[in-house]
Amino acid sequence: MSDAPAITPAERDELRRHGILLTSLQELYTWGNSNSVWPLNFGLACCAIEMIAASMAKFDIARFGSEVFRPSPRQADLLIVSGTVTKKMAPQVVRLWNQMPEPKYCIAMGACAISGGPFKQGYNVLKGIDRFIPVDIYIPGCPPRPEALLHGLVELQKKIKGFQLTGPDAPRHLRADSQCDFPVPEFGEHDLDPPANPEVWKAPTIVRTK
Amino acid sequence: METLEQLRDRLLARFPGAEVSVVTNPGPAAQHSLLLGPAHARAIALFLRDDPALKLDQCSNVTGVDWPDKQITDTVRTPVLDAAGATVRILEEKTTRLRPGYLEIVYHLYSIALRHGPVILRLRTTNRTDQVTAPSLTPVWRACEFQEREVFDLFGVVFDGHPDLRRILMWPEFKDHPMRKDYVEPDDYEWEPTPHGTVLEKAKGHYPPPAAGPAAKTEELKN
């Protein structure tokens, strides 16, 4: 691909006006992938109400090709973690994630899914779903408005469109060395066991600037 | 509806030997309650439900309270008199005693039929370690079932006579009782955006040690 003569986007647009479409397999692949992101029909708390609102006519998530909320993880591409993940629920969320086929993406919607939110210090609330699942897009808010979810979806599409299909920067599902199965935490005597997946999450380090 | 004192006297007359006393609430709510002994609690509850003057047919709320061991200081003031009988000084004698802790279960009862309430019942366990049994009132009010399970789950009160005593919020393998005062939560703190109080203390254990030097000192002062 690198041997091909360089062509500028302006030249491409000029050719397109004359009815000649130049593209690459990568572009076609990511274009199709990013415009058919089917979310899992899965809600956890009040953020799910906003997610439902985003799928209705007023906000119309169908404009972005994501109107097909699948009731089965086998048919879904996108897990929108919309709400508080309790420790009792966390293994089920990871299990759903494992049942989704690659390529799959995860959006952490709202303060609870990102960090535990207002319930962060609760005894039964997971301090962010990114402790067990690799999260692609974080949408802050409590809850985020449907526009924010749509913006998150557009950002996810941008991310998908930027994928390199080959090389070390390839997405997870195109690399041989990456895992698609994430360990499901077990119920321990005092906490989830393990409390976080060290493969995907480690505690943020504080950088002291002064 | 009759006052709580009248109700207590009527219960004592109806159930001789029962432990019934009025626990006053000194707060502005002034919702006083009836403390029942475990032996007659269920019989008294049945009476409260079926008595035509009370008809407390709805149990709207069951909750638990954890009372840990508490040091209580009693102060006895004795005036020291001189020969003429006037007070010279007041001798203060302080004695401390340990009030052993217990778990308490509070029931709020209303009457839908007669439109009055609430009548508040309290039950207490003997202690909060090994004798944590209390009579279940689920056979009297079916609405207690889930709430007593919740009290069992979060406080560790074992309800005697409950039809299905399992944990309801936490998973069955869980060993602790999170709403007890001495519950130690798992130490999975990380960086906290706006830490203060106990959260700051817990999060500090996970912060990297501050670098030596004057710059680090100012940063600490800012925190």
Image: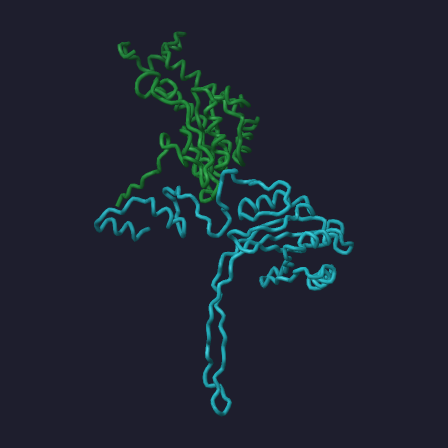
In the rendering, at what x and y percent does residue A201 appear?
37, 33
In the rendering, at what x and y percent does residue B216 appear?
25, 49
Farthest residue to the right: give it.
Answer: B52
Q: Name the one closer to the observer, B76 or B112.
A: B76
**Is the residue B110 above or below the residue A21 in the image?**
below
Residue B144 found in image quarter: top right
Q: Name the one closer to the observer, A1 or B88.
A: B88
Q: Is residue B218 left or right of residue B87?
A: left
Q: Which chain is green?
A: A
**Is the residue A107 above or below the residue B91 in the image?**
above
Residue A69 found in image quarter: top right
In the rendering, at what x and y percent does residue A39 appear?
50, 24
Q: Going 69% across and 61% down the picture, which residue do you hit?
A: B17
**Is the residue B172 above or below the residue B201 in the image?**
above
Q: Going 47% across and 31% down the picture, which residue do you hit?
A: A91
Q: How many marks?
A: 0
Residue A194 found in image quarter: top left
Q: Which chain is cyan?
A: B
Q: How is the image coloured?
A: by chain
In the rendering, at what x and y percent does residue B179 appear?
51, 48
Q: Going 52% across and 51% down the picture, which residue do you hit?
A: B130
Q: Going 29% across and 51% down the picture, which residue do you hit?
A: B220
Q: Is residue A81 left or right of residue B145?
A: left
Farthest residue to the bottom: give it.
Answer: B84
Q: Name the quadrant of the N terminus of chain A.
A: top left
